[in-house]
Amino acid sequence: MLPLIERLGATHAAEFRWANEQLHFSVLLTLNNAYYQVRENETQAYSELFRIELESRGLHELLRRFMSTLASLYRADSACLFFLDKNDQVLVPMACVGSGTKTPPHLVTNELPLSAALSKPFCLDEEGYKGDWILDKRTRDRYATCWSVPLLDGLRLRGVMQFRFRKKYEWLPREQEMLEVAAERCLMGAAKVRLMEDLAAREEQVRRLAERMLQVEEMERRRISRELHDEAGQSMLCIRLQLEMIEGNLVPEAGELKGKLQETRDLTERTILEIRRLIAALSPAVLEQLGLGAALRQLVSRFSRVHPARVKLALSRMGKVPKKTEVIVYRLVQECMNNVGKHSQASHVNISLESADGVLRLNVEDDGVGFEVEEALSRRDSYGLAGLRERVALLGGKFYVESHPRGNGKTGNTKGDTQVSRLGEAGACGGMKFKGRFRKGTRIHIELPLLREANH
Protein backbone atom coordinates (compact mmCIF):
# COMPACT_ATOMS: atom_id res chain seq x y z
CA MET A 1 0.00 0.00 0.00
CA LEU A 2 2.88 2.42 0.59
CA PRO A 3 3.61 3.06 -3.15
CA LEU A 4 -0.06 3.85 -3.68
CA ILE A 5 -0.10 6.19 -0.68
CA GLU A 6 2.89 8.18 -2.01
CA ARG A 7 0.93 9.06 -5.16
CA LEU A 8 -1.75 10.90 -3.13
CA GLY A 9 0.41 13.91 -2.46
CA ALA A 10 2.24 15.09 0.62
CA THR A 11 -0.83 16.09 2.66
CA HIS A 12 -2.94 13.03 2.03
CA ALA A 13 0.04 10.68 2.07
CA ALA A 14 0.91 11.66 5.66
CA GLU A 15 -2.64 10.99 6.81
CA PHE A 16 -2.79 7.63 5.07
CA ARG A 17 0.66 6.63 6.37
CA TRP A 18 -0.59 7.37 9.90
CA ALA A 19 -3.74 5.29 9.31
CA ASN A 20 -1.65 2.48 7.84
CA GLU A 21 0.63 2.45 10.89
CA GLN A 22 -2.39 2.31 13.20
CA LEU A 23 -3.86 -0.55 11.19
CA HIS A 24 -0.54 -2.39 11.28
CA PHE A 25 -0.31 -1.86 15.07
CA SER A 26 -3.87 -3.13 15.56
CA VAL A 27 -3.14 -6.26 13.55
CA LEU A 28 0.01 -6.97 15.58
CA LEU A 29 -1.82 -6.37 18.86
CA THR A 30 -4.68 -8.65 17.84
CA LEU A 31 -2.32 -11.43 16.76
CA ASN A 32 -0.30 -11.04 19.94
CA ASN A 33 -3.45 -11.30 22.11
CA ALA A 34 -4.62 -14.30 20.12
CA TYR A 35 -1.21 -15.97 20.53
CA TYR A 36 -1.23 -15.62 24.30
CA GLN A 37 -4.90 -16.60 24.50
CA VAL A 38 -4.08 -19.83 22.66
CA ARG A 39 -1.17 -20.47 25.01
CA GLU A 40 -3.39 -19.81 28.01
CA ASN A 41 -6.05 -22.21 26.71
CA GLU A 42 -3.41 -24.89 26.10
CA THR A 43 -1.98 -24.43 29.59
CA GLN A 44 -5.40 -24.71 31.18
CA ALA A 45 -6.28 -27.75 29.07
CA TYR A 46 -3.13 -29.67 29.96
CA SER A 47 -3.47 -28.71 33.59
CA GLU A 48 -6.99 -30.16 33.37
CA LEU A 49 -5.57 -33.36 31.83
CA PHE A 50 -3.20 -33.70 34.77
CA ARG A 51 -6.07 -33.17 37.23
CA ILE A 52 -8.18 -35.76 35.37
CA GLU A 53 -5.35 -38.27 35.63
CA LEU A 54 -5.24 -37.77 39.40
CA GLU A 55 -9.00 -37.81 40.00
CA SER A 56 -10.24 -40.52 37.65
CA ARG A 57 -11.39 -43.71 39.37
CA GLY A 58 -11.60 -45.90 36.31
CA LEU A 59 -10.21 -46.30 32.81
CA HIS A 60 -13.40 -45.33 30.96
CA GLU A 61 -13.85 -42.21 33.07
CA LEU A 62 -10.23 -41.19 32.44
CA LEU A 63 -10.44 -41.63 28.66
CA ARG A 64 -13.84 -39.96 28.33
CA ARG A 65 -12.70 -36.88 30.27
CA PHE A 66 -9.41 -36.76 28.35
CA MET A 67 -11.19 -36.75 25.00
CA SER A 68 -13.79 -34.23 26.16
CA THR A 69 -11.05 -31.80 27.25
CA LEU A 70 -9.06 -32.15 24.02
CA ALA A 71 -12.17 -31.84 21.83
CA SER A 72 -13.13 -28.66 23.66
CA LEU A 73 -9.60 -27.24 23.31
CA TYR A 74 -9.46 -27.74 19.53
CA ARG A 75 -13.21 -27.17 19.01
CA ALA A 76 -13.77 -30.56 17.41
CA ASP A 77 -17.36 -31.51 16.66
CA SER A 78 -16.72 -35.17 17.49
CA ALA A 79 -13.86 -37.18 18.97
CA CYS A 80 -13.24 -40.89 19.50
CA LEU A 81 -10.50 -42.95 21.08
CA PHE A 82 -9.80 -46.58 20.18
CA PHE A 83 -7.54 -49.07 22.00
CA LEU A 84 -6.12 -52.28 20.60
CA ASP A 85 -7.14 -55.43 22.42
CA LYS A 86 -4.62 -57.73 24.14
CA ASN A 87 -4.01 -59.67 20.93
CA ASP A 88 -3.62 -56.52 18.75
CA GLN A 89 -6.33 -57.82 16.45
CA VAL A 90 -9.26 -55.45 17.08
CA LEU A 91 -9.53 -51.72 17.70
CA VAL A 92 -12.06 -51.25 20.51
CA PRO A 93 -13.87 -47.90 20.99
CA MET A 94 -13.16 -46.69 24.54
CA ALA A 95 -14.39 -43.07 24.55
CA CYS A 96 -16.57 -40.99 22.24
CA VAL A 97 -17.66 -37.38 22.78
CA GLY A 98 -19.44 -34.74 20.76
CA SER A 99 -22.25 -34.95 18.25
CA GLY A 100 -23.15 -38.18 16.51
CA THR A 101 -25.48 -41.10 16.80
CA LYS A 102 -26.39 -42.52 20.17
CA THR A 103 -24.99 -45.92 19.29
CA PRO A 104 -21.27 -46.49 19.97
CA PRO A 105 -18.81 -47.08 17.09
CA HIS A 106 -18.26 -50.59 15.83
CA LEU A 107 -15.17 -52.68 16.45
CA VAL A 108 -12.53 -52.30 13.74
CA THR A 109 -10.36 -55.19 12.59
CA ASN A 110 -6.69 -54.25 12.84
CA GLU A 111 -5.25 -55.22 9.48
CA LEU A 112 -1.65 -54.53 8.55
CA PRO A 113 -2.26 -51.62 6.10
CA LEU A 114 -4.60 -49.94 8.58
CA SER A 115 -2.15 -50.41 11.45
CA ALA A 116 0.69 -48.94 9.39
CA ALA A 117 -1.41 -45.92 8.43
CA LEU A 118 -2.66 -45.26 11.99
CA SER A 119 0.88 -45.44 13.39
CA LYS A 120 1.55 -41.96 12.01
CA PRO A 121 -0.39 -38.73 12.66
CA PHE A 122 -2.37 -37.41 9.71
CA CYS A 123 -5.03 -34.88 8.78
CA LEU A 124 -7.67 -35.94 6.21
CA ASP A 125 -9.92 -33.54 4.34
CA GLU A 126 -12.91 -34.35 2.15
CA GLU A 127 -10.72 -36.10 -0.40
CA GLY A 128 -9.27 -38.40 2.24
CA TYR A 129 -12.68 -39.66 3.32
CA LYS A 130 -12.61 -42.05 0.39
CA GLY A 131 -10.06 -44.14 2.32
CA ASP A 132 -10.61 -46.50 5.23
CA TRP A 133 -8.51 -44.65 7.80
CA ILE A 134 -11.53 -43.10 9.54
CA LEU A 135 -12.41 -45.53 12.34
CA ASP A 136 -15.76 -44.06 13.35
CA LYS A 137 -17.82 -44.32 10.18
CA ARG A 138 -21.10 -43.16 11.75
CA THR A 139 -22.56 -40.11 9.99
CA ARG A 140 -19.27 -39.71 8.11
CA ASP A 141 -20.90 -37.40 5.55
CA ARG A 142 -21.42 -34.73 8.21
CA TYR A 143 -17.70 -34.04 8.62
CA ALA A 144 -15.13 -32.45 6.32
CA THR A 145 -11.88 -32.99 8.25
CA CYS A 146 -10.41 -35.67 10.49
CA TRP A 147 -7.31 -35.47 12.68
CA SER A 148 -5.74 -38.77 13.70
CA VAL A 149 -3.07 -39.13 16.42
CA PRO A 150 -1.57 -42.53 17.36
CA LEU A 151 -1.01 -43.80 20.90
CA LEU A 152 2.45 -45.35 20.68
CA ASP A 153 4.30 -47.48 23.21
CA GLY A 154 7.75 -47.09 21.73
CA LEU A 155 7.17 -48.16 18.14
CA ARG A 156 4.17 -50.32 18.96
CA LEU A 157 0.69 -49.01 18.20
CA ARG A 158 -1.59 -49.23 21.27
CA GLY A 159 -4.47 -47.02 20.13
CA VAL A 160 -5.51 -43.94 18.21
CA MET A 161 -7.33 -40.65 18.84
CA GLN A 162 -9.39 -39.11 16.04
CA PHE A 163 -11.05 -35.67 15.99
CA ARG A 164 -13.61 -34.71 13.34
CA PHE A 165 -14.72 -31.26 12.16
CA ARG A 166 -17.68 -30.16 10.05
CA LYS A 167 -15.53 -27.61 8.23
CA LYS A 168 -12.22 -27.95 6.48
CA TYR A 169 -9.70 -27.45 9.25
CA GLU A 170 -6.02 -28.04 8.51
CA TRP A 171 -3.99 -28.48 11.67
CA LEU A 172 -0.92 -26.45 12.47
CA PRO A 173 2.44 -28.02 13.39
CA ARG A 174 2.07 -26.89 17.00
CA GLU A 175 -1.39 -28.47 17.25
CA GLN A 176 0.00 -31.74 15.93
CA GLU A 177 2.89 -31.59 18.39
CA MET A 178 0.62 -30.85 21.34
CA LEU A 179 -1.77 -33.66 20.42
CA GLU A 180 1.12 -36.11 20.25
CA VAL A 181 2.16 -35.04 23.76
CA ALA A 182 -1.46 -35.44 24.92
CA ALA A 183 -1.60 -38.92 23.35
CA GLU A 184 1.55 -39.93 25.22
CA ARG A 185 0.07 -38.58 28.46
CA CYS A 186 -3.20 -40.39 27.81
CA LEU A 187 -1.43 -43.70 27.26
CA MET A 188 0.60 -43.28 30.47
CA GLY A 189 -2.52 -42.34 32.44
CA ALA A 190 -4.40 -45.34 31.08
CA ALA A 191 -1.55 -47.66 32.04
CA LYS A 192 -1.49 -46.22 35.56
CA VAL A 193 -5.26 -46.55 35.97
CA ARG A 194 -5.13 -50.14 34.77
CA LEU A 195 -2.41 -50.89 37.31
CA MET A 196 -4.49 -49.25 40.03
CA GLU A 197 -7.58 -51.25 39.03
CA ASP A 198 -5.54 -54.46 38.98
CA LEU A 199 -4.07 -53.61 42.40
CA ALA A 200 -7.53 -52.85 43.78
CA ALA A 201 -8.83 -56.15 42.42
CA ARG A 202 -5.94 -58.03 44.00
CA GLU A 203 -6.44 -56.23 47.32
CA GLU A 204 -10.12 -57.13 47.21
CA GLN A 205 -9.15 -60.72 46.50
CA VAL A 206 -6.80 -60.67 49.50
CA ARG A 207 -9.53 -59.16 51.67
CA ARG A 208 -11.99 -61.85 50.63
CA LEU A 209 -9.41 -64.54 51.27
CA ALA A 210 -8.65 -63.07 54.71
CA GLU A 211 -12.37 -62.91 55.50
CA ARG A 212 -12.77 -66.52 54.42
CA MET A 213 -9.81 -67.52 56.60
CA LEU A 214 -11.42 -65.83 59.60
CA GLN A 215 -14.68 -67.64 58.88
CA VAL A 216 -12.80 -70.92 58.68
CA GLU A 217 -11.01 -70.04 61.91
CA GLU A 218 -14.33 -69.42 63.69
CA MET A 219 -15.76 -72.65 62.29
CA GLU A 220 -12.69 -74.56 63.47
CA ARG A 221 -12.97 -72.95 66.90
CA ARG A 222 -16.59 -74.11 67.15
CA ARG A 223 -15.67 -77.61 65.99
CA ILE A 224 -12.87 -77.91 68.54
CA SER A 225 -15.10 -76.57 71.30
CA ARG A 226 -17.79 -79.14 70.40
CA GLU A 227 -15.20 -81.91 70.38
CA LEU A 228 -13.89 -80.81 73.77
CA HIS A 229 -17.42 -80.63 75.17
CA ASP A 230 -18.74 -83.87 73.69
CA GLU A 231 -15.62 -86.04 73.96
CA ALA A 232 -13.00 -84.77 76.41
CA GLY A 233 -15.48 -82.97 78.67
CA GLN A 234 -17.89 -85.88 78.94
CA SER A 235 -15.02 -88.35 79.43
CA MET A 236 -13.60 -86.26 82.28
CA LEU A 237 -17.04 -86.12 83.91
CA CYS A 238 -17.29 -89.91 83.71
CA ILE A 239 -13.80 -90.25 85.21
CA ARG A 240 -14.78 -87.98 88.10
CA LEU A 241 -17.97 -89.96 88.66
CA GLN A 242 -16.06 -93.25 88.63
CA LEU A 243 -13.54 -91.87 91.10
CA GLU A 244 -16.35 -90.79 93.42
CA MET A 245 -17.93 -94.28 93.23
CA ILE A 246 -14.59 -96.00 93.89
CA GLU A 247 -13.91 -93.66 96.81
CA GLY A 248 -17.33 -94.41 98.25
CA ASN A 249 -16.78 -98.21 98.06
CA LEU A 250 -13.43 -98.16 99.84
CA VAL A 251 -13.22 -99.69 103.29
CA PRO A 252 -12.34 -97.36 106.17
CA GLU A 253 -8.91 -99.00 106.55
CA ALA A 254 -7.80 -97.78 103.05
CA GLY A 255 -7.16 -94.22 104.22
CA GLU A 256 -3.97 -93.70 102.21
CA LEU A 257 -5.62 -94.93 98.97
CA LYS A 258 -8.63 -92.79 99.72
CA GLY A 259 -6.40 -89.70 100.01
CA LYS A 260 -4.79 -90.40 96.65
CA LEU A 261 -8.22 -90.84 95.06
CA GLN A 262 -9.24 -87.49 96.54
CA GLU A 263 -6.19 -85.81 94.97
CA THR A 264 -6.93 -87.47 91.64
CA ARG A 265 -10.56 -86.35 91.82
CA ASP A 266 -9.49 -82.76 92.58
CA LEU A 267 -7.11 -82.81 89.63
CA THR A 268 -9.90 -84.12 87.42
CA GLU A 269 -12.18 -81.34 88.66
CA ARG A 270 -9.59 -78.70 87.79
CA THR A 271 -9.13 -80.26 84.36
CA ILE A 272 -12.90 -80.09 83.78
CA LEU A 273 -12.91 -76.40 84.73
CA GLU A 274 -9.97 -75.74 82.38
CA ILE A 275 -11.75 -77.53 79.54
CA ARG A 276 -14.85 -75.40 80.18
CA ARG A 277 -12.68 -72.26 80.10
CA LEU A 278 -11.15 -73.34 76.79
CA ILE A 279 -14.60 -74.07 75.36
CA ALA A 280 -15.84 -70.63 76.39
CA ALA A 281 -12.73 -68.96 74.90
CA LEU A 282 -12.96 -70.88 71.64
CA SER A 283 -16.64 -70.37 71.00
CA PRO A 284 -18.45 -68.10 73.48
CA ALA A 285 -22.09 -69.17 73.45
CA VAL A 286 -23.13 -65.93 75.15
CA LEU A 287 -22.00 -63.98 72.06
CA GLU A 288 -24.44 -65.82 69.83
CA GLN A 289 -27.24 -65.92 72.40
CA LEU A 290 -27.09 -62.53 74.16
CA GLY A 291 -24.92 -60.35 71.92
CA LEU A 292 -21.67 -58.44 72.06
CA GLY A 293 -22.25 -56.48 75.27
CA ALA A 294 -22.99 -59.54 77.41
CA ALA A 295 -20.06 -61.43 75.87
CA LEU A 296 -17.64 -58.59 76.70
CA ARG A 297 -18.91 -58.41 80.30
CA GLN A 298 -18.37 -62.14 80.67
CA LEU A 299 -14.89 -61.83 79.16
CA VAL A 300 -13.96 -59.05 81.60
CA SER A 301 -15.39 -61.03 84.52
CA ARG A 302 -13.31 -64.09 83.68
CA PHE A 303 -10.20 -61.94 83.21
CA SER A 304 -10.71 -60.33 86.63
CA ARG A 305 -10.88 -63.76 88.29
CA VAL A 306 -7.39 -64.75 87.09
CA HIS A 307 -5.64 -61.37 86.90
CA PRO A 308 -5.14 -58.82 89.69
CA ALA A 309 -5.66 -55.77 87.43
CA ARG A 310 -8.86 -53.78 87.90
CA VAL A 311 -10.82 -53.60 84.66
CA LYS A 312 -13.36 -50.89 83.86
CA LEU A 313 -15.72 -51.61 80.97
CA ALA A 314 -17.83 -48.80 79.45
CA LEU A 315 -20.40 -49.74 76.81
CA SER A 316 -22.67 -47.29 75.04
CA ARG A 317 -25.79 -48.11 73.08
CA MET A 318 -24.51 -49.53 69.82
CA GLY A 319 -27.74 -50.45 68.08
CA LYS A 320 -27.68 -53.35 65.65
CA VAL A 321 -24.17 -54.55 64.84
CA PRO A 322 -23.55 -57.13 62.08
CA LYS A 323 -22.74 -60.60 63.41
CA LYS A 324 -19.38 -60.71 61.68
CA THR A 325 -18.45 -57.35 63.19
CA GLU A 326 -19.49 -58.58 66.63
CA VAL A 327 -17.22 -61.62 66.30
CA ILE A 328 -14.28 -59.49 65.15
CA VAL A 329 -14.77 -56.94 67.95
CA TYR A 330 -14.97 -59.74 70.51
CA ARG A 331 -11.74 -61.26 69.19
CA LEU A 332 -10.07 -57.83 69.24
CA VAL A 333 -10.96 -57.28 72.90
CA GLN A 334 -9.98 -60.87 73.71
CA GLU A 335 -6.56 -60.41 72.12
CA CYS A 336 -6.05 -57.08 73.89
CA MET A 337 -6.90 -58.70 77.24
CA ASN A 338 -4.53 -61.58 76.53
CA ASN A 339 -1.71 -59.11 75.77
CA VAL A 340 -2.47 -57.15 78.95
CA GLY A 341 -2.43 -60.32 81.04
CA LYS A 342 0.80 -61.68 79.55
CA HIS A 343 2.99 -58.62 79.07
CA SER A 344 1.72 -55.35 80.52
CA GLN A 345 2.01 -55.88 84.31
CA ALA A 346 -0.82 -53.36 84.53
CA SER A 347 -2.87 -52.65 87.63
CA HIS A 348 -5.70 -50.82 85.83
CA VAL A 349 -7.32 -51.38 82.45
CA ASN A 350 -9.99 -49.24 80.79
CA ILE A 351 -12.12 -50.57 77.92
CA SER A 352 -14.72 -48.47 76.14
CA LEU A 353 -16.92 -49.27 73.15
CA GLU A 354 -19.22 -46.77 71.47
CA SER A 355 -20.82 -46.12 68.10
CA ALA A 356 -21.63 -42.83 66.41
CA ASP A 357 -22.03 -41.64 62.81
CA GLY A 358 -21.83 -45.18 61.46
CA VAL A 359 -18.48 -45.89 63.16
CA LEU A 360 -17.77 -48.30 66.02
CA ARG A 361 -14.94 -47.06 68.27
CA LEU A 362 -13.01 -49.34 70.61
CA ASN A 363 -10.48 -48.02 73.14
CA VAL A 364 -8.28 -50.21 75.34
CA GLU A 365 -5.75 -48.56 77.66
CA ASP A 366 -3.64 -49.77 80.58
CA ASP A 367 -1.02 -48.39 82.97
CA GLY A 368 1.49 -51.17 82.27
CA VAL A 369 5.16 -51.21 81.33
CA GLY A 370 4.58 -50.38 77.65
CA PHE A 371 6.73 -51.42 74.71
CA GLU A 372 8.50 -50.19 71.57
CA VAL A 373 5.77 -50.22 68.95
CA GLU A 374 7.95 -50.26 65.82
CA GLU A 375 10.09 -53.05 67.26
CA ALA A 376 7.01 -55.11 68.17
CA LEU A 377 5.53 -54.69 64.71
CA SER A 378 8.76 -55.68 62.98
CA ARG A 379 9.19 -58.92 64.94
CA ARG A 380 8.18 -61.97 62.93
CA ASP A 381 7.50 -64.11 65.98
CA SER A 382 5.00 -61.60 67.40
CA TYR A 383 1.41 -62.03 66.23
CA GLY A 384 -0.54 -59.93 68.74
CA LEU A 385 -0.44 -56.47 67.11
CA ALA A 386 -0.26 -57.95 63.62
CA GLY A 387 -3.38 -60.02 64.28
CA LEU A 388 -5.21 -56.98 65.62
CA ARG A 389 -4.27 -54.90 62.60
CA GLU A 390 -5.25 -57.61 60.12
CA ARG A 391 -8.67 -58.05 61.69
CA VAL A 392 -9.22 -54.29 61.57
CA ALA A 393 -8.05 -54.20 57.95
CA LEU A 394 -10.62 -56.85 57.05
CA LEU A 395 -13.45 -54.45 57.92
CA GLY A 396 -11.75 -51.40 56.39
CA GLY A 397 -11.17 -49.74 59.76
CA LYS A 398 -8.48 -47.62 61.40
CA PHE A 399 -5.95 -48.89 63.92
CA TYR A 400 -3.85 -46.71 66.24
CA VAL A 401 -1.35 -47.71 68.93
CA GLU A 402 0.47 -45.46 71.38
CA SER A 403 2.81 -46.87 74.03
CA HIS A 404 5.09 -45.30 76.65
CA PRO A 405 7.84 -47.77 77.67
CA ARG A 406 9.01 -47.32 81.24
CA GLY A 407 12.59 -46.46 82.01
CA ASN A 408 13.87 -44.89 78.77
CA GLY A 409 11.58 -41.89 78.47
CA LYS A 410 10.77 -42.77 74.85
CA THR A 411 7.36 -43.06 73.27
CA GLY A 412 6.51 -45.49 70.53
CA ASN A 413 3.69 -44.48 68.23
CA THR A 414 2.15 -46.01 65.19
CA LYS A 415 -0.88 -45.47 63.05
CA GLY A 416 -2.43 -48.02 60.75
CA ASP A 417 -4.97 -46.45 58.39
CA THR A 418 -7.09 -48.98 56.41
CA GLN A 419 -9.47 -47.89 53.50
CA VAL A 420 -11.90 -50.26 51.12
CA SER A 421 -8.79 -50.85 48.82
CA ARG A 422 -5.89 -51.01 51.45
CA LEU A 423 -4.73 -53.43 54.12
CA GLY A 424 -3.56 -52.13 57.50
CA GLU A 425 -0.19 -50.42 57.49
CA ALA A 426 2.01 -49.09 60.27
CA GLY A 427 3.57 -45.68 60.11
CA ALA A 428 3.84 -42.48 62.08
CA CYS A 429 1.03 -41.70 64.44
CA GLY A 430 0.57 -38.35 62.77
CA GLY A 431 0.38 -36.36 65.99
CA MET A 432 -2.76 -38.10 67.20
CA LYS A 433 -3.38 -37.56 70.93
CA PHE A 434 -5.24 -40.09 73.08
CA LYS A 435 -7.42 -38.81 75.87
CA GLY A 436 -6.91 -41.30 78.69
CA ARG A 437 -6.56 -41.33 82.44
CA PHE A 438 -3.16 -43.05 82.42
CA ARG A 439 -0.01 -41.05 81.72
CA LYS A 440 2.02 -44.21 81.06
CA GLY A 441 1.29 -47.56 79.51
CA THR A 442 -0.36 -48.50 76.22
CA ARG A 443 -3.42 -47.20 74.43
CA ILE A 444 -5.10 -48.88 71.47
CA HIS A 445 -7.77 -47.08 69.46
CA ILE A 446 -9.77 -48.90 66.77
CA GLU A 447 -12.45 -47.52 64.46
CA LEU A 448 -14.64 -49.88 62.43
CA PRO A 449 -17.30 -48.81 59.92
CA LEU A 450 -20.74 -50.24 60.70
CA LEU A 451 -21.65 -51.73 57.33
CA ARG A 452 -25.00 -53.22 56.60
CA GLU A 453 -25.06 -56.98 56.83
CA ALA A 454 -25.89 -57.41 53.13
CA ASN A 455 -23.11 -55.09 51.99
CA HIS A 456 -20.65 -56.65 54.41
Image (spheres, rainbow, N blue to C red):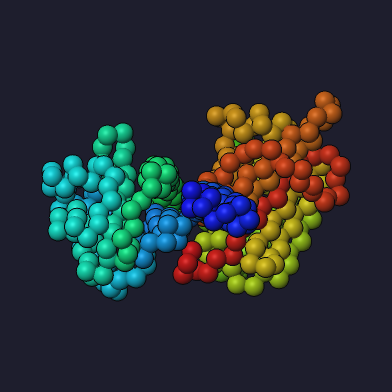
331, 377: nearer the viewer? 377
Q: Position of residue 222 (x, y in %)?
A: 46, 55
272, 33: nearer the viewer? 33
Residue at 46 percent across and 57 percent down: it is 73
Residue at 54 percent across and 56 percent down: it is 8
Residue 170, compared with residue 358, is above or below; it is: above
Q: Is residue 210 visible?
A: no
Q: Identify the residue at the far front of this view.
A: 9
Q: Identify the residue at the far top of this view.
A: 408
Q: Position of residue 288 (x, y in %)?
A: 54, 66
432, 213: nearer the viewer? 432
Residue at 48 percent across and 64 percent down: it is 456
268 horizontally vs 432: left or right: left
Residue at 18 percent across and 42 percent down: it is 116
Q: Position of residue 75 (x, y in %)?
A: 42, 61
Residue 398, compared with residue 297, is above or below; it is: above
188 horizontally vs 320: left or right: left
